[in-house]
Image: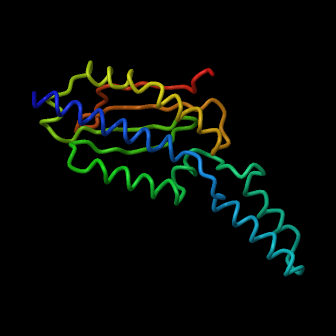
Amino acid sequence: MKNLIRKMLLVMCVATFALAFTACGKSDKPEPDAVEEEDTAKDEAEEPEEPAAENEEDASDLPASGKYATLEDFINSDLMQEQLDSQIASLEGTGLTADITAEDNKLVYNFTITDPNVAASLDAAALQSSLDSQASTFESIASTIPLAVEIDNPVVVVRYLDSTGAVIVSQEFAPSAE
């Protein structure tokens, strides 16, 4: 019974974590880069003595779409870091830690099982079942990535790792074909 409760708590924590990123993936607020671009435009109008080369260089740093250039830039943004810190803090005491990284077009969730009691109660089949039940959530996350990042064919990778860093279960999720 205790193992079943632990399994359910772990699955709920992972699902909450994934849903939080889905819900927080798109914001109506202007991105910090877009605000800086507006400020730069105002400064250029006020100070005409700036060399034209500097103005062109500033504009080329930001894509016209206002999206992040890479997944790494998106993950390292202040907005995402705040959300990550909040979600990681919510996992404290569950025997699970989380880390999110970017590898080319892949957004990688690494869930490390640090509590030996939790690790003993879970097996690869239970973790795979959990991933299968959350497939639509991770596919949805993959679908929303292009809204914030200049990227084609994004993939979400979810890995469950043991305390040594060895992969227990890993699965890739592409955007759902809707």
| Residue at 10 percent of width and 31 percent of height | 2
State whether residue 57 is above or below residue 3: below
Q: Which quadrant of the structure image shows residue 82? A: bottom left
- x and y percentages locating residue 135 in the rendered image: 44, 24
- x and y percentages locating residue 176 in the rendered image: 57, 23
In-image side of 133 versus 148 (left or right): left
- x and y percentages locating residue 113 in the rendered image: 24, 38
The mark total stands at 0
| Residue at 41 percent of width and 27 percent of height | 134
**41 vs 167, nearest the viewer:** 41
- x and y percentages locating residue 50 in the rendered image: 85, 77
Quadrant of the snapshot with the N terminus: top left
In-image side of 152 versus 19 (left or right): right
- What colour scheme was applied to this rendering of the protein? rainbow
Quadrant of the snapshot with the C terminus: top right
| Residue at 85 percent of width and 81 percent of height | 47
Q: Which quadrant of the structure image shows residue 130? A: top left
In-image side of 149 versus 76 (left or right): right
State whether residue 76 is above or below residue 99: below
| Residue at 57 percent of width and 44 percent of height | 71
State whether residue 8 is above or below residue 33: above
